[in-house]
Image: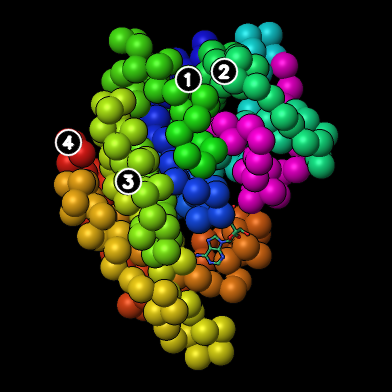
Amino acid sequence: MGLDNVQHIIMVLSGKGGVGKSSTTTQLALSLSGSGHSVGVLDVDLTGPSIPRMFSIEDAKITQGQEGLIPVTINEADPDKGIGRLSAISLGLVAQRGDSIVWRGPKKTAMVKQFLNDVVWPPNTEYLLIDTPPGTSDEHITLVENLSLADQGSRLSGAVVVTTPQAIATADVRKELNFCKKGGIRVLGVVENMSGFVCANCSECTDIFSKGGGQVMANDFSVPFLGGIPIDPQFSDLIELGQEPKYPEGTIITGQDMSQSGSGD
Ligand code: ADP
C-alpha cells in the first residue's frame, strides 16, 4: 500500500510560483513515459493544483478502490510504441473546479500524508514525480519527514529545482537549495525555465532576460545544472495536448543527465 509500488521518487521544487514548476513536472512525466517508463504524478500543490489542467484531466475523478485511492490514468502503457503508463493524483481532482482551498497547517499535513499513504499507484511505477507548492511550507516538511523514514529513504531519489533567470537573482532559489541541504535531499539538478524567447515566426531564440544564472547557482551549490528551457508561446497549448514542445536546435542548454547527478552536498 502507499508507495510500495513506486521505485524512485523525485520532488519538483521552486522558490516562487509561476516559474514553471508544474510545467516542468509535466514535461518530465511526458518524456519519461514517452521513453517507456511507468510514471505517476502526485500534485501536492494543495492551494493551486495545476496538474489536472496541464494533463487536461480536469473532469476526471479519483476513485476509492478496496485498498485505497486510485489515481487517474492519463496514458495506458503501450510497449509496442515504447510508451509507459502515466497516472496522476491531485486535490484538484477531488475538489470542485474553482473552489478555493484555504487550509491551515495540520489539515494540509493530513492531506499530504493521505496522498502518501492511501494512494494505490499502479504496480511497478518506476518514477513518482511530486509537484510541490512554491517555497518551503508545511507540505514540503511533511513530505521530507515522511519520505525520509527508513523504509522510504531509498526511494526518495532527490529533487529537481526549477527557476527562471529573474528568480535566480533573488534569495528564493538559494532558500530552496538550502532546504534540500538541511533536509539531506539530494539535488538532482537545477532547471532554468523561460530562459530566452523563441520567436514563433523565425524560431530564433532571444535572451530577453539575463541567461546563465542557473548554471552559476548550480556551481555555487555544487549541484548539477540540467538545462535551460526557452519561453515558447505555444508551450501551454502543446502541454495540454500531451505533447512536448519541440524547441529549435540550439535553444535548449543541455546540462548534465539526471542519472549522472552528484550528491548535492
Ligand atoms: P508554477 O508551477 O511554477 O506556478 P506553471 O508551470 O504553472 O508555474 O507555469 C506558469 C505559466 O507559465 C503557465 O501558464 C505555463 O503554461 C507558462 N509557462 C511555463 N513555462 C513556460 C515556457 N517555457 N514557455 C511558455 N510558457 C511557459
- The secondary element bearing badge 4 is classed as loop
Mark 4, mark 3: which one is toward the viewer?
3
Q: Looking at the picture, does residue 35 appear above or below residue 177?
A: below
Q: Amino acid at mark 1?
A: Thr
Of label 2 and label 1, which has the lower sequence position? 2
Q: Is residue 61 magenta?
A: yes
| Res 65 seen here | yes
Dot 2 surroundings within 10 Å: few (below 14), some, or many (20 or more)? some
Q: Amino acid at mark 3?
A: Arg
- In three-dimensional space, the C-alpha distance between marks 1 and 3, rounded to whole angstroms, equals 20 Å
Q: How many marks?
A: 4
- In three-dimensional space, the C-alpha distance between marks 2 and 1, rounded to whole angstroms, equals 6 Å
Residue occupying the far front of the picture:
171
- In three-dimensional space, the C-alpha distance between marks 1 and 4, rounded to whole angstroms, equals 22 Å
Q: Magenta residues?
A: 41-64
In the picture of the structure, the residue carrying the numbered disc 1 is: 142
User: Residue 237: x, y in percent?
Assistant: 65, 65
Of label 1 and label 3, which has the lower sequence position? 1
Of label 1 and label 4, which has the lower sequence position? 1
In the picture of the structure, the residue carrying the numbered disc 4 is: 265
> Image quadrant of residue 251?
bottom left
Dot 1 surroundings within 10 Å: few (below 14), some, or many (20 or more)? some
- The secondary element bearing badge 1 is classed as helix
2 and 1 marks in contact (CB < 8 Å): yes
Q: Amino acid at mark 4?
A: Asp
- The secondary element bearing badge 2 is classed as helix
Marker disc for residue 174: 3
- The secondary element bearing badge 3 is classed as helix
Q: Looking at the picture, does residue 62 appear above or below residue 207?
A: above
